[in-house]
Amino acid sequence: MNTTKERKFKPEKLFEPRDFKRPEIQDKQYLEIGAGKGMHAMQFAEANPSKHLIAIERTRAKFDVFSERSRELALNNLLPVHADAIPWVVHALPPESLEGVFLLYPNPEPKNSSQRWLNMPFFEFLISRMKPNATLVLVTNIVDYFKETTEVNRDVWKLKAEESEVPKDSARTHFEIKYLARGENCYQLLLTKPHNYKTSFDEWAI
Ligand SMILES: C[S@@+](CC[C@H](N)C(=O)[O-])C[C@H]1O[C@@H](n2cnc3c(N)ncnc32)[C@H](O)[C@@H]1O
């Protein structure tokens, strides 16, 4: 898995996303990537009024549903963003700005291992945006993906890891509800960024 680190991420090559607006980063700032129709994002924001969540979704049709519902809820601690998360994170987030990251049911392309979040050189940049002790939650129903992700973390990124099975009555996202209703097992990896963790992007900011 050395190749993940050898293929260096080049943030300077990424253009600012279209219609980009720089967000105000809050003290207790969380980020969700691939928010779908926003079920988890809206529940999280409602349940945690003192925390702020930026939730990014790339697919226009899903984002439109999310955006409409969140406007109705008028949650002032939730910012839905329609963008590809990779250039958006590069342009929007300073180092050590996040308390937590959610990657919920990312469903990677089975044949393209380089599209999986922990296999991407971008993952090092994402870690650099997390504060010390910040957490990253990744959940999936694909056991091989879960195992691979756990191994890549152990061998390459070396964040503190806790593995668990998602409780059968959990209902955080549309995909989670669908998989658990089908009787599938879902798996959660909770990663924590250790204090004194170094990345190549710790000084990198736009
Ligand atoms: C399988 S869906 C899961 C949606 C939601 N998290 C759920 O569990 O119901 C994965 C979502 O991630 C989004 N996505 C994938 N890569 C993304 C990226 N680079 N930036 C933003 N969204 C992305 C896709 O558009 C898709 O809606």
Image (spheres, rainbow, N blue to C red):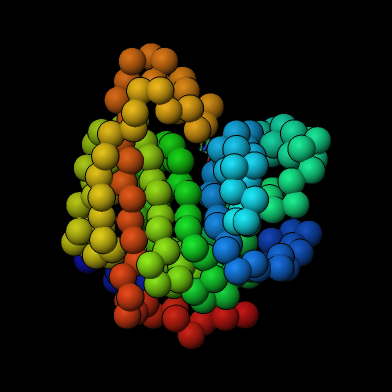
Q: Quadrant of residue 17?
A: bottom right
Q: Is residue 136 above or below residue 201?
A: above
Along the line of sight, the residue nearer the viewer: 153 or 30? 30
Which of the image's four quarters has the N terminus?
Answer: bottom left
User: Can the viewer see residue 37 in this picture?
Assistant: yes
Q: Is residue 66 above or below residue 128?
A: above
Q: Give the residue at x 76% y 37%.
A: 73
Q: Give the residue at x 48% y 85%.
A: 203
Q: Quadrant of residue 4?
A: bottom left
Q: Give the residue at x 74% y 62%.
A: 20
Q: Give the residue at x 47% y 23%.
A: 177
Where does the image place residue 88, in percent across and percent down from the top left? 62, 61
Along the line of sight, the residue nearer the viewer: 45 or 108? 45
Taking 49 as reference, is 139 left or right? left
Where does the image place residue 179, in percent across and percent down from the top left? 40, 22
Q: Is residue 62 above or below residue 24?
A: above
Which of the image's four quarters has the C terminus?
Answer: bottom right
Taking 29 as reference, is 197 left or right? left
